[in-house]
Image (cartoon, rainbow, N blue to C red):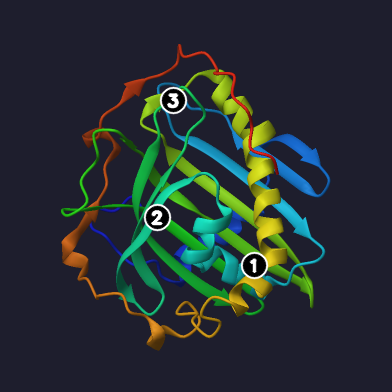
Amino acid sequence: MSGQTVTIPDDRAFASFKAECLCEEGWNMSYNKLGITVWSQSLEAGKSVHKIKCRMVCKDVSAETMYDVLHDIEYRRKWDTNVIETFDIGKLTVNADVGYYSWKCPKPLRNRDVITLRSWLPIGKDYIIMNYSVKHAKYPPKKEMVRAVSIMTGYMIQSQGPNNCTLTYMAQVDPRGSLPKWVVNKSSHYLAPRAMKKINKACLKYSEWKQRHNPGFKPWLYPEQTTLPSIPLSELSIQRAESLENIDESSLAEAQEREDSD
């Protein structure tokens, strides 16, 4: 979202995101194993924006289950081992809200967080969830975190049958820092594929988990269930990268740490 004011994505924005998810021109494939493919785009000279795209074929998960798992914030706290803190701030419309998410970065990098405007839309049997960074006066950058900027990030879920779907994740992010090359390589060759596998595993366990945790509560499907306060767009502004701290972590060496078991 490159405009001057915060807007809620319209049908054209969703169509544009879908087209970019499907497009392979200008993307370099960096990983392709066991139904998971990862592409990246080269950094522009002088720019720190990273673009990565992952696609996973799920032969044992329905598009509807995948959509629920990616929405369910309570369940995310259980399966997403990268999450430090995540919560919803408020709703804008029946299919748009604002939320906070912070995550662990590979050591010794500083951890990152974002405030994003998230919107979602079922399109036939397919689903899109996407977000971009905004500013909210009550949630300024934290001293211990680096506030990153999501230029456009999200998921596209395509139904391939009753219990079969394809998930595409695309992220265009400014991490607000000069990252070392090993981080970029690790993201595409290891971190992104592992994240996709974790989503797949989370989907397989979701039905059983949800039956024990407020099974009928799905405000992303039934907006009348939401308990979030309404917030006006006027409380939000576009998060500009240049207004945030930019740190140089390019010389940091990778820390040897025990990896989480999948």
Label 1 SS: helix
Report the residue that reaches farthest toward the bottom.
224
Q: Which mark is residue 86?
A: 2
Q: What separation in Å lies between label 3 and label 1 (alpha carbons)?
A: 31 Å
The answer to whether residue 14 shows anywhere in this view is no
Which is nearer the eye, 52 or 97? 97
Report the residue that reaches farthest toward the front.
212
| Total marks in image | 3
Neighbours of disc 2 within 10 Å: few (<14), some (14-19), many (20+):
some
Of the two numbered discs 2 and 3 on the same chain, state the one appearing first in sequence: 2
Which is nearer the eye, 187 or 124? 187
Q: What separation in Å lies between label 1 and label 2 (alpha carbons)?
A: 19 Å
Circles 1 and 2 in contact, beta carbons < 8 Å: no
Residue behind mark 1? 66
- At 57% from the left and 58% from the top, the residue drawn is 155
Q: Nearer the viewer, mark 1 or mark 2?
A: 2
Label 3 SS: loop
Neighbours of disc 1 within 10 Å: few (<14), some (14-19), many (20+):
many
Can you say which quadrant of the picture contains the C terminus? top right
Circles 3 and 1 in contact, beta carbons < 8 Å: no
Residue type, numbered disc 2: Thr
Of the two numbered discs 3 and 1 on the same chain, state the one appearing first in sequence: 1
Residue behind mark 3? 109
